[in-house]
């Protein structure tokens, strides 16, 4: 599975959009990009995933570049409750596995 | 619908003891995965069970073991506990469809080894 690179930390003002980048330059054609987040001392929470097209759900939007080598998770109106560690993970969609490789993630601090 | 349930939530053991943790997946989910989280190593994959069979295994010593029952509930066991086994142990379940596979995590079992 492809390796990902994320900035270790980011700040965002409450009410503004939070844009979290992720580089996955070795991604292959059948690998999905997943985003999870972990609020302190809780289990990770699934946010969104995508293969090629941009995706949006009630939590966030995922923008994947045309060459698929990087992506951005967008939280449109960040709140204090969005303060968490955000993990970008790349994995084959048909791998039939619950094995996720978590990196260090990005610690997002939303400030009032 | 009910989420992934892990028990116990907190426990304290002493070195040399053994511990068993339980995980009840979301109804209909057949895959159960276990993870260990420590401040130093982050989130690390332990193993995964599917249809009562271990399907994937991480790089942990044999003291860490698990099993899955016919109702998809899973247990993990750690024998001969060491101080370094103090961690948050997380369980995740998934429906295991073709294509993208989304995991739902439980709240975890926090183990302290004294």
Image (cartoon, coloured by chain):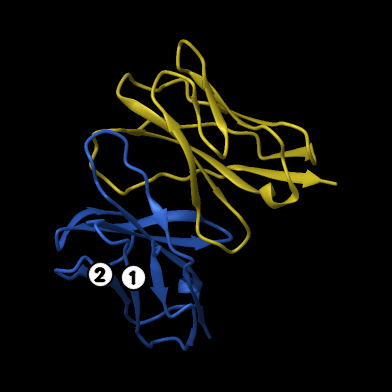
Identify whether B12 is placed above or below B83. below
Mark 1 packing: few (<14 Cα in 10 Å), some, or many (20+)? many
> Which residue is at 48% across, 18% downward?
A69
Q: Report which quarter residue B61 is drawn in.
A: bottom left
- Residue A67 position, x and y percent, is 45, 11
Assign a secondary structure to mark 2. Answer: loop
Host chain of mark 1:
B
Give the secondary structure at mark 1: strand
**How far across and down, in percent of the image, does residue B17 sit?**
38, 88
Instruction: Say which of B95 and A38 sits in front.
Output: B95
In this view, the residue farthest toward the front is B1
Q: CA distance from mark 1 to mark 2?
A: 6 Å
User: Where B103 falls versus B7 (above or below)?
Assistant: above
Left or right, A102 with respect to A80, comes to: left
Q: Tag 2, which chain?
A: B
Q: Is residue B70 above or below residue B43?
A: below
Instruction: From the viewer's side, name the closer residue of A89 and B44.
Output: A89
Point 43% across, 80% down: residue: B8
Instruction: Give me the disc on residue B13.
Output: none
- Where residue B18 appears, as percent x and y from the top left, is 35, 84
> Is the N terminus of chain B in the top left, top right, bottom left or bottom right quadrant?
bottom left
Residue B86 vs residue A90, the one in the foreground? A90
Quadrant in which residue B79 is drawn: bottom left
Name, please, the residue furthest toward the top: A66
Label the yellow chain with its letter.
Answer: A
Residue matched to label 2: B73
Q: Residue at label 1?
A: B23
Q: Position of residue A78 (x, y in %)?
A: 72, 40
Mark sitting earlier along the chain (1/2): 1
Judging by colour alone, the chain drawn in blue in this rendered image is: B
The answer as to whether the residues below labels 1 and 2 share one chain is yes
Q: Are marks 1 and 2 in contact (CB under 8 Å)?
A: yes
């Amino acid at each position: 599975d492809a390796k990902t690179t994320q900035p270790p930390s980011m700040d965002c003002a409450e009410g503004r959009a939070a844009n979290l980048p992720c580089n996955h330059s070795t991604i292959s054609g059948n690998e999905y990009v997943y985003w999870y987040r972990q609020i302190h001392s809780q289990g990770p929470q699934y946010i969104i995933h995508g293969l090629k097209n941009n995706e949006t759900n009630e939590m966030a939007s995922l923008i994947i570049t045309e060459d698929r080598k990087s992506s951005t998770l967008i939280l449109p109106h960040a709140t204090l409750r969005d303060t968490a560690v955000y993990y970008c993970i790349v994995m084959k969609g048909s791998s039939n596995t619950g094995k996720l490789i978590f990196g260090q993630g990005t610690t997002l601090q939303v400030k009032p | 619908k009910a989420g992934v349930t892990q028990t116990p939530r907190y426990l304290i053991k002493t070195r040399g003891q053994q511990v068993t943790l339980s995980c009840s997946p979301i109804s209909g989910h057949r895959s159960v995965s276990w993870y260990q989280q420590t401040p130093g190593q982050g989130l690390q994959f332990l193993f995964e069970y599917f249809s009562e069979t271990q399907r994937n295994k991480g790089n942990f010593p044999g003291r860490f073991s698990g099993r899955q029952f016919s109702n998809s509930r899973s247990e993990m066991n750690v024998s001969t506990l060491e101080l370094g086994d103090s961690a948050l142990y997380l369980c995740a379940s998934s429906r295991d469809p073709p294509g993208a596979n989304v995991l739902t995590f439980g709240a975890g079992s926090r183990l302290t080894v004294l």
